[in-house]
Amino acid sequence: SFAKQRPDSVNGVAEVMNQLMASSSWSSLFESNIILKERLRELPMDVQAALGLQSEKVMGLISPEAKRKATGGDVPASIRGVAVAMQSIRIPPCKPPAGGGYAGATVVVAPPPPPPAPVPDKWK
């Protein structure tokens, strides 16, 4: 595990976990995958606590000791701020308007055709 071998990378791993757990399909996959849950519990307590702070679902999967660290504030401030920072940059999902379409869609209109070329003056 990258986070296990490189404890200095916990902030980056926490950011990735936060973004992945925001995806309902990835979150469902994570929760149903026994191997991923086992690997999560094999991580050091500090790393588990950092990842648990990124998602309530992950918080429910970490060890009780890591959960105490996370909820007791026994993690660096930089890790505690990851979830807030990631939430602030995440684009909220848009619901399609009642008439269909995509609420965030922009209608692109083709530019008007160029004006006709000027007719050269002819001397008669």
Image (cartoon, rainbow, N blue to C red):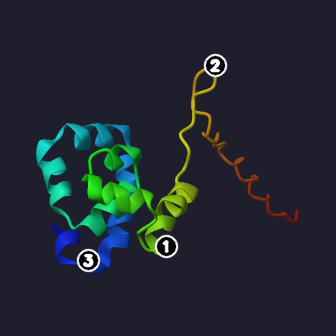
Q: CA distance from mark 3 to mark 2?
A: 50 Å
Residue carrying label 1: 77
- Tell me the residue at 30%/80% (across/down): 8
Between circles 2 and 1, the one closer to the viewer is: 1
* Of 23 and 109, the residue lying toward us: 23
Residue reaching furthest to the right? 124
Secondary structure of the residue carrying numbered label 3: helix
Quadrant containing the C terminus in the rendered view: bottom right
Decide: few, some or many residues near mark 2? Use Cα within 10 Å; few <14, some 14-19, many ≥20: few
Is residue 16 at all visible to an observer of this figure? no
Label located before the other in sequence (2 or 1)? 1
Secondary structure of the residue carrying numbered label 1: helix
Label located before the other in sequence (3 or 2)? 3
Question: Residue 65 appears in which quarter of the rendering?
Answer: bottom left
Q: Amino acid at mark 1?
A: Ala
Residue carrying label 2: 99
At which x and y percent is residue 108? 63, 43
At which x and y percent is residue 13? 32, 66
Residue carrying label 3: 7
Query: Is disc 3 in contact with disc 2, using a CB cutoff of under 8 Å?
Result: no
Secondary structure of the residue carrying numbered label 2: loop
Tell me the tag on residue 53. Answer: none
Q: CA distance from mark 2 to mark 1?
A: 45 Å
Q: Is residue 65 left or right of residue 82?
A: left
